[in-house]
Image: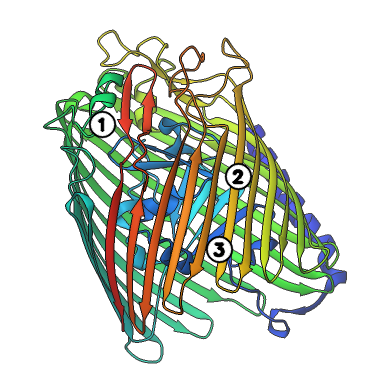
Amino acid sequence: MRTMKKQFTLSIAAVLTASYLYTPNAIAEQNAQSKPLEVIVVTGRQAKNDLDIPSNIKVIDSSDIEASGATTLEDVLRGQSGIQVSDTNSGAVFSIRGFNGGQAANNTLILIDGRRLNNIDIAAPAISAIPLNRIERIEVLSGSAGVLYGDQAVGGVINIITKSPTDAGGSVYLAGGSFDSQEVRADYSNRINADWSYYLTANHQKSDSYRRHNASETGSILGRLQYENGDTRFFAESSYYDSDREYAGSLTKEQLKQDPRQSNSTTDYGHQISKVYRLGYSQAINKAWAFDSELNFNDSNTNGSSFGSSATNSRELLRFTPKLIANYKTDSGNLNLLFGSDLSLGKSEFIGGFTNGRSNTQKLVSLYTQATVPLTKELDYIVGGRYSDITDEIKDPNTFAQGADLDNDAHAVEFGLNYRPNTNNRLYVRAEDNFRFAKVDEQAYSNANGLKPQTGRSYEAGWDFSSQKQSLKISLYQLELEDEIVFDPSAEKPYPDARWNGANVNAEASKRLGFDADWNLQLFEKLNVGAEYHYIDSEFTEGTNKGKELPWIAKNTGRVFSTYDLTDSLQLFTEANYVGKRFLEGDNANTGEKLDSYALLNTAINYRKNNWLASLRLDNLLDKEYVSAGYSYGAFYPGEGRSWKLSLQYQF
């Protein structure tokens, strides 16, 4: 503990010293005399041009979403080749830089407007609560972000930025399609006076889904009141989310071949209700410094039946995230300082089923800092550090019958160089620590009487090129992990009458080497084309499985796409997504056969006239059969077959 605190203190001292030594001779004038930074991304916890952040960042804006014809956020993220998907037909989880389905929800951080959607237990974030009409853009940061975000920002961060309109206007959206799917959305905003405005949105969707006994129904409403006057901003927001879904269960290999749409369950389901309350306040302190903060509370309750056992899981999470931001203009460029804290108190309680009596109260305190210091007009360096302390008051009738207080801490430091020799090119290198803490479900189903934090380090180098007609992003990376938290089906049961074989363990060390390439070209005035390719060589680097591939991680994934304006009103979108061969999840020794590779073809036709937009989206056009989640003990979940959806939207 003391050593880690000391290391964190030293990292802060390094930031402050560098800034202090640089600032007195270099500061020419403060922000009031300079043009503001171009606001492109906020994944760096402050508004910056994406090329000023030494990371691989992709922005999917509202025009990209509209062109794709996608009708759900899941569909949008499935179409990105750098994001691997695992779906047990109960909601997809998304992995960046090489994690299987069981690890993805805890190693990929998902945010909405900077607020965490990840839970304090292993349940996946409920992204189906976010209708597309609310989304302004999606920022995907590939790579570790341990300093800025801490716990769970291991493989990457997906930050969903929502709209906050202030002027009068709105939209109405209707959609229907395969498997009796239906959706209705509406939103409206207006000004109360010069300073105050409000925004309201609601949606409802339902579908019988591809498989039998897999129907779903989701609804959400949100209201936001916001104030802006000069250097002062404030907002208050409340939202309600209700989701009901039937679970079809896994299939055997033979059942998958016979009929992938069949169900192995007639009673399992999940029903989740969530209420979220948010307060945000930001204030310029002077010409250089600003204060920003958010207080949010999430109250969630899930009940249902799984494997024939009924249970309820209630969660509460209170978070406070204050930060100080400084921006100075110097002779060599902008000097940016960031000091922040993430404070949270979470509670999780399980009632009924085989987890009956399990509970956890989690307290997390984190401090972090980061500085971007210009050395010349072309070259910046970035340095930062974070220290996190977490306490779990955990109880489980089988493994922690008397209760236990588990206290862990972790730290992260980063260093990067960002070089922009001209307006078209950017080169960067970066090294950053990452970590994640075990969740209550993982701790309670382990043999270790308390799992250690997972730790690691990421190294990355990249080149970005952009011109009026094309852009190219290339990055090379290495991700090394120690004490990786995984479920090992060959491990000893946590207790004799445990429901499943295996246990959660701190596994052998692992390494991921990768290459990312993303290219986009405006070939003709009316034709845009693009291609993405992602390669991951992942393996265990210690223990009995040393040299073996990490399961459920495809070495090769890719995507090609095009958007063609047939007329001023009519647009055609086409994409093909490829996923290479991979071992089944749990096959750490690589003893089984790999799943076959597959490619999915999707297309959309969009027609816009005045304030109207009509779209026809066709997914899996060739009706390719594939496995969306598969496990070495013989459980398979089929991917969705051919489907279509027709939508109509009116904006006013």
Residue 260: mark in rendering: 1
Give the residue pinned by disc 2. 533
The kind of residue on which mark 3 rests is Val
Q: Name the residue rendered at 45%, 37% in the picture.
A: 104
Residue 253 place in picture, x, y as percent: 31, 20
Give the residue pinned by disc 3. 42
Image side of residue 572 versus residue 373, left or right:
left
Q: In 3D space, how far apart are the residues under numbered discs 1 and 2 (Cα atoms)?
A: 29 Å
Residue 337 place in picture, x, y as percent: 68, 63
Q: Name the residue rendered at 42%, 11% in the picture.
A: 490
The quadrant where residue 613 appears: bottom left
Q: In 3D space, how far apart are the residues under numbered discs 3 and 1 (Cα atoms)?
A: 42 Å
| Residue at the extreme left of the image, as rendered | 267
Q: Is residue 189 visible?
A: no
Image side of residue 443 versus residue 542, left or right:
left
* Label 3: element kind: loop
Front-lying residue, 446 or 140: 140
